[in-house]
Amino acid sequence: MTGGMRMPTTADLMSMWNASGLKEKMIFTFLMLVLFRLGIHLPVYGINNEIFSNIASGNNILGFLDLFAGGALRKVSIFALGIGPYITSSIIMQLMAVIIPALEKLQKEDGEAGRRKLSQYTRIFTVVLAAFQGIIFMTYLAHLPGSIAPGLSHTMFYVSSVITLTAGSVLVMWMSELITEKGIGNGGSLIIFVGILSGIPLYSANTWQMVAHDTMLMWGLVLLLTIFFVTMIFIVIMQEAVRKVIIVNPKRQVGNKVYGGVNTFIPFKLNPGGVMPIIFAVAILLFPSTILSLVGQANLPAGWVQDMVLVLNKIFNPSGLTYYAIYFVMIVGLTFFYASIMPNMQPREIADNLKKYGSSIPGIKPGKPTADALDNILTKTTFIGALGLGIIALVPAFASYITRITTLQGIGATSLIIMVGVALDLINQVRTHLLARNYETFLKE
C-alpha cells in the first residue's frame, strides 16, 4: 500500500487561479454556497422558532441533524430539510438500480440518456421524500404550544408550510446539482461540508464554557483534540492510499522501432467510496432517527405503540452503543456496495480489456484467471478500507465518551471524515482540472 499527498505551493495556487475556466468554476461554487447560507436565515412564515430551537438544543438526534443542515433546522428556515431528502433518494435509487433490471439497464447500457432518466427519477423521489418529511415535521411543530403564531388558519398554514419546506429542499437539490455540473467538487458533499463548518463556532463556545473552570476537563480536551488530529491524519492516509497491481504490456514493432513493453500498474484505492459511505450511512440512520425523535416527543397514549417508539428511539439514538454498532456495519456494507458499482472496479471488464490489448498480470493467465485474481485483490483491499473507515468513524466518538467532553461530539468522527474527505476530493478535482488544462495547452503548442 502506498499513500500520501503533497500540499499545494504558492505557485500551484496561482496556477489554479489563473487556469482557464477554473477561476469561473470556483467563483460559481462560492456564490452558490453563499446563496445556500443566505437561505438558511429565511424562516418559515408563522413559526416561533425559539421554542423548537430550545428543544433541538437538548436533543442529540435533532442537534446532529441540524449540524448537517447547517443550522437551518434549528431556525426552522425554508432549508430546514436540507440536502437530506436528495441524498436519501440517491441512495435508494442506486440500491434499486442493483435490484431492478430495468433501472440497471438505464444505468449501465443506455449511456448518457439512461443516466439522465435515472437522475430524473431521483429528483421526483426527492420531492416525495421532502414532502413526507415536511408533513412529519409540521405535524410535530403543530403540537408544540406557542410554536405557531396566533390568528393563522391552521389548515392553510399547515399546507403552505409543507409546500415551502418541500420547495426549499428541491432548491437545495438544484443548487447541489449546479455546483456538481458547473462548479468544482460534489455539490451535495460541499453543502454538508459548509453546514458542518458553520457549526464549529457554536460547538467551540459550548466546549469552552464546559472546561473553562475544570482543570481535569481541560486536560481531557487536549487529549480529545490530539485524538481528533491523529484521526485526521489516518483519514488522509485512508483517502489517498492505493494498491498497485503491476501490468505487463506487450511490445510492438513498427518499422525499425519497438514500442510498448513498459510495465504499468492499475491503482485500486483502499477506500474507493471516499466520503460517500459515511454520508450514506448517516443519511439512512438519521431518517428513522428523526421521525422517531419527533414522534417520541408527541403525547402518545400509553400502550404498546409508545413502548415500541421508546425502544426504537433508544436503538437509533446517536449516543447509544447500538447506534454505533449499526453505524459501523452500515459503513462496511456501503463501502463494499459503492466499490461494486464503480466502473473502474469491475474485475471482469478490466480482465477483458487487458486481454483485448494483450496486457497481463505477471504469473496469471489472461481471461477468467485474471478476473478471479483481480476480484480477490479488490475484495481484500476493500475489506481493509471498509474496516479502517469504520474504526476511524468510531474512535473519536468513544474518545468523547471517555474524556466526558460531549459538546464536541457533533463535530466528532463523522464530521471529521466528511470535512477531510470533501477537502481532499476538492483538491484532487482541482489538480485534475489543472492537469487537463496543461495537457490541452501542450497539445496546442
Image: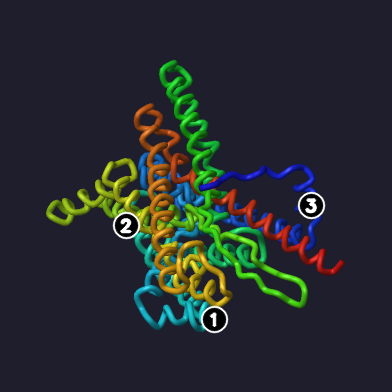
Which residue is under mark 2?
A: 288
How dense is the environment of label 3, judged by Cα within 10 Å: few (below 14), some, or many (20 and up)?
few
Kind of residue at badge 1: Gly
Q: Report if the CB atoms under discs 3 and 1 are less than 8 Å apart.
A: no
Which residue is under mark 3?
A: 15
Which residue is under mark 1?
A: 111
In the rendering, at what x and y percent does residue 9 appear?
Answer: 74, 42
In the rendering, at what x and y percent does residue 415 appear?
Answer: 48, 45
Label 3 secondary element: helix
Apparent side of residue 441 relative to residue 98 in the rendered image (left or right):
right
- Asked which quadrant contains residue 220, the reply is top left
- Colouring used for the render: rainbow
Q: Residue at x 32, y 52 (%)?
A: 329
Residue 388 seen from this side:
yes
Label 1 secondary element: helix
> Looking at the image, which is closer to me, 249 or 378?
249
